[in-house]
């Protein structure tokens, strides 16, 4: 988002409250839902896989809720600027603090479910040093002040271009891990065609997920922490971390199998979360080949 527009909206919200921004976001999201039928249809087909026993109109309703829930990401961003503008509860965060306290760090395996900005601010209490990989387009839309605010919370953001080389993902992340930090990356989206991937089952379909998180874990020996954040109310969130998952292989021939098992474990946990919080799923692009229709 352009800095000037963001500052204008932020200033307006201070005098009128965020309700006018929320209403505007609702209108904009509705326009996207109506005017981009291809993407909307992709969401409908996805929810057909999630709820195969329900009818077409229920799947459309799920997509409608998904789109409009996504608007809360921007609205809550404005709320975060206010003092005490975010409330959250943690679940399983002792796994992260325990690892850091023992000098052991790892991979925070995130997803496009929930609000990563809320998670970043919530993790501040743990005093973790985190490197967050983010798509370049999403990175460019973040206002400079927000980037600085996240940096103040111990979050270093690295943009990943769709045209970047596959090696880019490795060097900086591995260096950060060796310097006793956590590396956070989305486990449910391939940034570009150069990335190596792993095939898993997700809602009964073959899906290709990034291999990089499991390579990092295998090479460095650090654990993978599957990590989710969901919105439970107005600027209120639940931040969840699962127990550490290690990717180990006794022989070179067993490496691929070890990574595939870890990736499938993540996919199964993500599937459980999507079933529980379907409207929090902010993934609007096709996931499997039979969904990649014009």
Image (cartoon, rainbow, N blue to C red):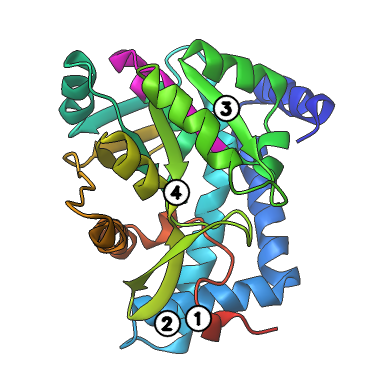
**Gap in Å between the C-alphas at discs 2 and 1?**
5 Å
- Residue ID for mark 1: 45
Seen at 57% across and 27% down, the residue is: 157
Distance from label 4 to label 3 (Cα)?
A: 17 Å
* Secondary-structure class at tag 4: helix
Q: SS at mark 2?
A: helix
Tell me whether the residue at label 4 lies in contact with that at label 3, contact meaning CB atoms closer than 8 angstroms: no
Q: Nearer the viewer, residue 52 or 17?
A: 52
Residue 198 spot, x, y in % from top left: 41, 64
Label 4 to label 2: alpha-carbon separation: 30 Å
Boundaries of the magenta span: 123-133
Distance of label 3 from label 2 (alpha carbons): 35 Å
Tell me which label, 1 or 3, sits earlier in the chain. 1
**Would residue 70 be found to the left or right of residue 111 on screen?**
right
Q: Which residue is mark 4?
A: 212
Q: Residues within 10 Å of mark 3 (few under 14, many from 20)?
A: some
Q: Mark 4 vs mark 1: which is more N-terminal?
A: 1
- Give the residue at mark 2: 48
Give residue 157's mark: 3
Q: Secondary structure at mark 3?
A: strand
Name the N-terminal-most of marks 3 and 2. Answer: 2
Label 4 Cα neighbours within 10 Å, binned few <14 / some 14-19 / many ≥20: many
């Amino acid at each position: 988002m352009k800095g000037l527009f963001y500052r204008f909206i932020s200033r307006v919200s201070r005098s009128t409250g965020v309700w006018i921004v929320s209403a505007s976001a609702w209108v904009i999201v509705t326009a996207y839902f109506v005017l981009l039928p291809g993407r909307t249809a992709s969401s409908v087909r996805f929810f057909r896989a999630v709820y195969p026993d329900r009818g077409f109109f229920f799947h459309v309703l799920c997509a409608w809720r998904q789109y409009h829930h996504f608007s809360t990401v921007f609205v809550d961003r404005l709320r975060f600027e206010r003092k005490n503008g975010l409330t959250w509860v943690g679940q399983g965060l002792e796994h992260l603090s325990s690892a850091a306290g023992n000098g052991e760090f790892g991979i925070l395996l995130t997803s496009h479910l929930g609000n990563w900005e809320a998670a970043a601010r919530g993790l501040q209490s743990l005093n973790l040093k985190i490197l967050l990989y983010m798509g370049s387009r999403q990175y460019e839309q973040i206002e400079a002040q927000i980037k600085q605010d996240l940096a103040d919370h111990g979050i270093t953001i690295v943009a990943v271009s769709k045209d970047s080389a596959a090696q880019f993902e490795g060097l900086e992340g591995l260096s950060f891990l060796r310097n006793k930090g956590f590396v956070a990356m989305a486990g449910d989206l391939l940034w570009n065609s150069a990335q190596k991937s792993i095939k898993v089952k997700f809602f009964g379909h073959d899906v290709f997920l990034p291999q990089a998180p499991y390579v990092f874990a295998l090479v460095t020996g650090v654990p993978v922490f599957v990590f989710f954040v969901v919105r439970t109310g107005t600027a209120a969130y639940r931040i969840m971390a699962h127990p550490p998952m290690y990717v180990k292989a006794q022989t070179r021939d067993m490496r691929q199998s070890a990574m595939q098992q870890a990736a499938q474990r993540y996919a199964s946990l993500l599937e459980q979360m999507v079933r529980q919080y379907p409207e929090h799923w902010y993934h609007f692009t096709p996931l499997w080949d039979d969904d990649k229709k014009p």
